[in-house]
Amino acid sequence: MRSLKFIALSAFTFALFSCGGDKKESSIPSADGSAPAATETPAASNASDYDPKRGLGKHDESNVDISKFDPAMAAEGKKIADVKCTSCHKPTDEKLVGPGWKGVTQRQTAHWIMNFISNPDPMIDVDPELQKQLELCLVRMPNQGLTDKEARDVLEYMREIDGAK
């Protein structure tokens, strides 16, 4: 019984420290190989400044084009998701650690999804729906350090799950 408590406590401690944090700098070098820049975290001084259709970040209607489905991008997105996402999310509507992905592209705009998966922390802090989700899941989504291309590929995979062709 004592070993079981120790294992449970160890697993909880590991999960607590491995899933997120207040890390503000990316460890991914920029395209030119220079040192990483600080992660974009546009400030929303209060929740009334927050746009729930866009989220917080650099992605919007002008730079996220989903007019055509790209199966190659979706295949790359699945590979990325298999490594970075599926330990917490299922491609169905079933909750694992985080919510299932089925239907997410109908519930959220493409640029909201891109902003959230690229840099979840500032959005979790101000988005009322994400705060409700956090109460259910009890674990903040960690920043996986996705590049813009990786985030776009994962979005395309999410679109495929939801029936985009």
Image (spheres, helix red, strand yellow):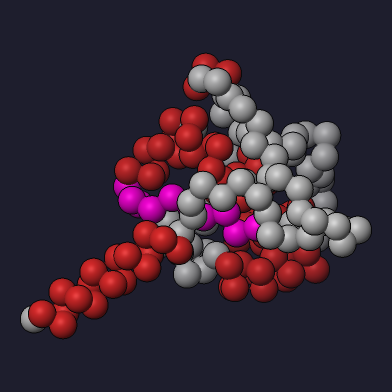
Left or right: where 82 falls relative to 124: right
Q: State the residue lying farthest toward the front.
A: 35
When the figure is inspected, residue 2 is found, relative to residue 68, above or below; the finding is: below
Left or right: where 91 falls relative to 8: right
Left or right: where 27 falls relative to 143: right
Residue 3, position as x, y percentages in the image:
16, 82
Q: State the residue lying farthest toward the top.
A: 48
Residue 87, position as x, y percentages in the image:
47, 69
When the figure is inspected, residue 45 is found, relative to residue 160, above or below; the finding is: above
When the figure is inspected, residue 39 is found, relative to residue 156, above or below; the finding is: above
Residue 93 visible here: no
Query: Is residue 142 covered in magenta?
Result: yes
- Find residue 9 and report its image quarter: bottom left
Seen from the viewer's position, the closer of residues 69 and 1 is 1
Residue shown at 77% from the left, 34% from the top? 61
Quadrant in which the C terminus appears: bottom right
Residue 96, position as x, y percentages in the image:
39, 63
Residue 2 visible here: yes
The residues colored magenta run 136-145
Seen from the viewer's position, the closer of residues 9 and 117 is 9
Residue shown at 71% from the left, 45% from the top? 38
Query: Is residue 123 covered in magenta?
Result: no
Q: How many marks?
A: 0
Residue shown at 49% from the left, 30% from the top? 126
Quadrant in which the N terminus appears: bottom left
Residue 27, position as x, y percentages in the image:
68, 60
Q: State the residue lying farthest toward the right.
A: 32
- Find residue 73 and report its image quarter: bottom right
- Find residue 82 and report its image quarter: bottom right
Seen from the viewer's position, the closer of residues 144 and 52 is 144
**Magenta region, mostly helix, strand or loop?**
loop
